[in-house]
Image (tube, rainbow, N blue to C red):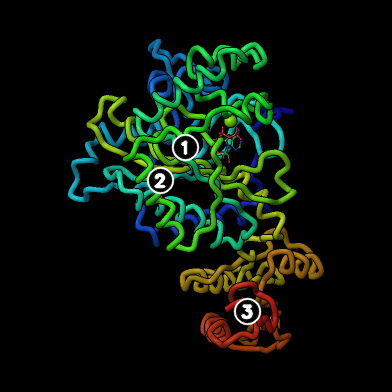
Amino acid sequence: MQRKMKGTYDILPSESSRWQAVERAIRRVSKIYNYKEIRTPIFEQSELFHRSVGEDTDIVSKETYDFKDRGDRDNTLRPEGTAGVVRSVIENKLYAADIPVQKLYYMGPMFRYERPQKGRYRQFHQFGAEAFGSNSPLLDAEMISYAVSVLKSLKLKEVTVKINSLGDSQSKEDYKIALLNYLEPNVKHLCKDCQTRYKTNPLRILDCKVDKGSLVLKEAPKPLDYLTKESQEHFDNLVKYLDQMDIAYTIDKALVRGLDYYTHTVFEVDANVSSLGAQKTLCGGGRYNNLVNDLDGPDIPAVGFAFGIERLLLALESIDYKGDAEYIHLFMMILGDDQKEDAAKMIQRCRLGGLYVDTDFLDRSMKSKFNQAESHNARFVAIYGANEKEANTINIKDQESGIQETIETDQLYTYIMTKLMEPSSKCETCEDDDCDDCS
Ligand code: ATP
Ligand code: MG
């Protein structure tokens, strides 16, 4: 038997409705914020990720899936979405479009060669957003609000938004010098990776999973204390806008994020639920004002975020989120081969009218047919046998009200539609009978 690759998994039919519900919520919120979907390839030239994500990030140095194609080109399965989106914006000159601020979102699989565990896989999915063309902190605030709204729309309340600022290039440079000076006598106490980072990319030391929590790092200088005047103003404005938008946040002075390209705002959204274990970060993002230019595009500022969808679903387990209820409108029970022609016609009529319909293809017993109707969560069950054929009628039972009736066969579609239009005592949001909680 062939088995799936380590760190991958199948989304089985029993789980796909939860995925679809989350995807639908994401699309709905994206519409509210006026972000449009972009779909870029799953593989790109390896160089793109080396140049954007950064050579000495964990992602590029340890986690990429690299392969040569038959033309001896270096390809990489995308480990994240921003690089491809930025490449596409530049290549398609989206920045020159009539709309001066391009607001884009994406959803899809990403690939990282990591040690698989709960909330960490080798193929996983991200939903991310990027906005190009404005350095306004109002856009940073919008991004954070957008991310929070996705969670709120899924009724996930136990979330923490952490924000920080790295400032512009000047602030980052000043901070880097201060950090190097501070760490110089302590480098030997850091992990091996951090000893390399000290030389190549000292900012990343603050994001190290090994040294996190050590006294050396706790007492290290913080980027917020090295902001230039303009950078401080940017951050102050962001905070003011978030306050006005009623978005709760905490300032986490040690937050730097794992990617090289961030400037100014960085943020993370954590879910405070036990089902996530150590993988609490649902979303990470920030501003990256130099990346478009670094990738040979014009000098255009940008800001974005990325959610891990698996982690989002794990977090939703804690609030018993079931996704959309699975159901069909009609399960047709055909009793006897002679009735199949008429039944095929009736089923077709109902489906053409948009009803969700299924039937039994295995000529099983009545009991089995009833079981199938129940597993499909059918609202109506119709029985069509020799007697019904004779009388040109069909027997139909409404599983919700328990009412059973015999109607003419050509009335089937209209009958079901009429019943579906009648007001139900069930709540449209949670599907409970007599719910008072949902508005
Ligand atoms: P972590 O610190 O958990 O490794 P990261 O900093 O590598 O996260 P990002 O590159 O910022 O993560 O990706 C954004 C989001 O994508 C993360 O917050 C997380 O929800 C999700 N994510 C990242 N890597 C994985 C993975 N291997 N499996 C599942 N989700 C992931
Ligand atoms: Mg990671």
Quadrant for the N terminus, please.
top right
Residue 384: tell me if it is visible: no
In this picture, residue 231 sits left or right of residue 120? left
Residue 48: tell me if it is visible: yes
The residue carrying mark 3 has its beta carbon less than 8 Å from ligand 1: no
Q: How far apart are marks 2 and 1 (CA)?
A: 9 Å
Say if 141 sits above or below 407 in the image: above
In this picture, residue 104 sits left or right of residue 279? left
In this picture, residue 206 sits left or right of residue 259? right
The answer to whether mark 2 and mark 1 are in CB contact below 8 A is yes
Q: Nearer the viewer, residue 349 or 183?
A: 183
Mark linked to residue 323: none
Q: Where does residue 91 sit, x and y in percent of width and height?
A: 26, 31
- Badge 3: how crowded within 10 Å, few (<14), some, or many (20+)? some
Residue for badge 1: 224
Q: Earlier in the sequence, mark 3 or mark 2?
A: 2
Q: Where does residue 304 sit, x and y in percent of width and height?
A: 41, 43
Q: Which of marks 3 and 2 is in front?
A: 2
Mark linked to residue 235: 2
Q: Which of marks 2 and 1 is nearer the N terminus?
A: 1
Residue for badge 3: 427
- The kind of secondary structure element at disc 3 is loop
Q: Distance between the residues labelled 3 and 1?
A: 48 Å
Residue at x-position 26% and y-position 48%: 101
Q: How far apart are marks 3 and 2 (CA)?
A: 43 Å
Say if 312 sits above or below 1 in the image: below
Amino acid type for the residue under numbered disc 1: Leu
Quarter of the rendered image showing ligand 1 = top right
Amino acid type for the residue under numbered disc 3: Cys
- The kind of secondary structure element at disc 2 is helix
Residue at x-position 49% and y-position 52%: 147
Amino acid type for the residue under numbered disc 2: Phe
